[in-house]
Amino acid sequence: MRKLLFFLVPCLAMFVLGGLWNSILLEKILALPAPVIARPPAEVRLGVIALAHVLLTAFMAFPFTQSFPNPPGSLAGFQFGSLFGVIMTVPVYLLLYAAWNVSLRALLVDAGWHAIEQGVGGVLLGVLLVEKRLPTYP
């Protein structure tokens, strides 16, 4: 059960934080028009977004368990997640900026948010990590 929580809780937290950011906060922080290629809110594919968060959590969980055989502190979990968020977004956003007419400022602000969002996911991974126990022999 704890292994399932290890995966589900960070996944749901990052999904909710991403929804909060993209549907409420981002618009208030950056008063920029959405790119021409953006879907209208009614046409956003929520199932694909959920699948992306499942994959994101899986891609975070594997190196997390390899890096931390025992539960790390909250700071280490946050640092891991934040780094993951930056690695995940900044190179892609620079490619998008190079090819599309989008605001670099908006992309970098969004990358900063991903450092926070995935940082929270990293803290939750750390809190819920099941310690790897070595077998004991009688």
Image: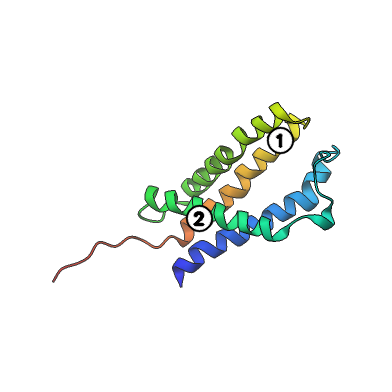
- Find residue 89 and report its horizontal and vertical position in percent: 61, 39
Of callouts 2 and 1, the N-terminal one: 2
| Image side of residue 91 versus residue 101, left or right | left
Q: Amino acid at mark 2?
A: Ala
Residue that protrudes farthest toward the left in the picture? 138
Nearer to me, 52 or 77: 52
- The disc at residue 58 is 2
Nearer to me, 127 or 89: 89
- Is residue 72 in view from this perspective? no
The C terminus is located in which quarter? bottom left
| Image side of residue 31 versus residue 121, left or right | right
Helix, strand or loop status at disc 2: helix
The residue carrying pointer 2 sits among few (fewer than 14), some (14 to 19) or many (20 or more) residues within 10 Å by Cα, namely some
Residue shown at 65% from the left, 39% from the top: 112
- Find residue 14 and report its horizontal and vertical position in percent: 62, 55
Q: Amino acid at mark 1?
A: Leu
